[in-house]
Image (cartoon, helix red, strand yellow):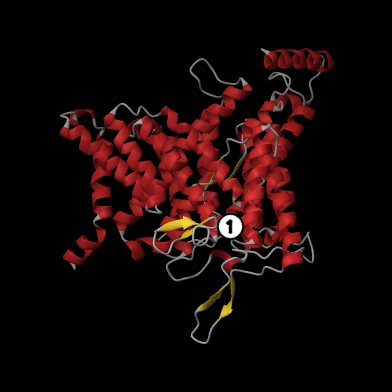
Amino acid sequence: MPRRGRIWESTCFVSTKTSAAPSRLDAFFKISERGSTVARELRGGLVTFLTMAYILVLNPLILIGAPDKEGNFLAGGDTAVIAACTALVAGVLCIVMGLVANFPLALAAGLGLNAFVTYSVANQMTWADAMGLVVIEGLVILALVLTGFREAVFNAVPAQLKIAISVGIGLFITLIGLVDAGFIRRGGGTPVEMGIGGQLQGWPVLVFALGLVLLITLYTRGVRGAILISIIAATVLAIIVEKIAEVGPTVTGFDQDGAPIVNPTGWNLNVPAWPDKIVDKPDFGLLGEFSLLGSWENVGVVTVFLLIFTLLLTDFFDTMGTMTAVGAEAGLLDEDGNPPRTKQILIVDSIAAAAGGAASVSSNTSYIESTSGVADGARTGLAAISTGVLFLLATFLAPIVKIVPNEAAVPALVLVGFLMMQQVKGIDWDDLEIAIPAFLTIVLMPFAYSISAGIGAGFLAYVLIKVVRGKASEIHALMWIIAVLFVVYFAIHPLTAWLT
């Protein structure tokens, strides 16, 4: 009720000011019609930017988290280049969303999607090939939207399996954060353990712990921009710690045999130090660094199809849920629960996936953080445009990313994992036909360190249980096809050996 009151008051206030002759800006974005003002839209866009600007730090850290099949890191491990391209693509896409769909929805590189590209795709091919698959995935989604086939894809996968996929990715992201912080490590007598020998050691782990405490405190108190604030505060602390303690990097050099000399209590990625310059001309050298056909030669048609399908599945359903949530928060849904200009929203989001691959920053997608701007009053595409302009300005601040150590940034991954984990309540754990597949999907993603392994196991378990319980007729035809492909996926090595 209070929110409706504010909207009603705003509408009345604006109408008395502009009833005679609404401005062209007001008329184009329907600002007064939706009960908002230009100032409120600009402020909402700023709030949205502050709540999702963390991606400019996290996306580079995730994308350089592992080398490709040839041992190369994306952009040679230069996080500033990845950050600049991440900001550029996000800025352009937010502006396009505002102009084309007139919806307060911001876009940027998708968390979860970038982890999948890094740990499940690039390890099988080159980075150019991996980003080529992202481009193909975006084009496939665009075709599904334009042809109306998206309903068939949406209905093929049980809703609760879609929830399990999101939850599993959340746990996977959390594990990545804890490992990158040195909080969880490979154990001596156990597969993993806390810290070193079961004990937390080193200044970097303390920085991570304090950053996580601050983030939890800010988030639970409802502070906007909690993630970004915690990253900045933890980075400042890390700079002070390094200045005093001179911790140094994890890898301090190499011995005469080429083996790395490891400092187990060192900083995992960047050694925090104030940069020579904060503002610099952005380097967009990653733009266009993708290959559409290279992956087909490297890993084969079946594997390529499954990787594209996994990307598509994660991207496609998250977008539909996000735009519905943003529309509900803004009070813009129609009687059927659809936001205005749904098709335009989905078209822009599909183009975003392909654009992210073309710029080598992973698939871009709609951000649920847009609800923060909506909660602050945003109702139109003008808010998305203002968010986009701020992202474009951020391209000149890319050097700052180089001073952020993993330990200061990855508390955000833990919180994102929690947010994705909250969806687990949407799974009926008393229904074995969905509970067991959901369980396998969720646990195998972090345990197997593979998103595709979790999805494949869940899909196969779902089909198996339906068959053994005599309910094969309830399985969608597309699920049968997917199940067969995942059988081939899991057995690809013995099948290859047998065929050759």
Relative to 384, is 108 above or below?
A: below
Q: Who's the residue at 41% across and 54% down the image? A: 449
Furthest-bottom residue in this view: 256
Residue 13 location (% of width, % of height): 81, 15
Whether residue 310 appears in this view of the structure is yes
Residue 475 location (% of width, % of height): 24, 32
> 241 or 462: nearer the eye?
241
Residue 483 location (% of width, % of height): 25, 43
Relative to 488, is 291 above or below?
A: below
Q: Quadrant of the N terminus?
A: top right
The residue indicated by pointer 1 is 61
Looking at the picture, which amino acid does disc 1 mark?
Leu
Relative to 22, is 167 above or below?
A: below
Residue 387 location (% of width, % of height): 70, 40
Q: Who's the residue at 45% across and 59% down the image? A: 130
Q: Quadrant of the C terminus?
A: bottom left
Q: Answer few, some or many: residues within 10 Å of disc 1's Cα (few below 14, many 20 plus, some between 14 and 19).
A: many
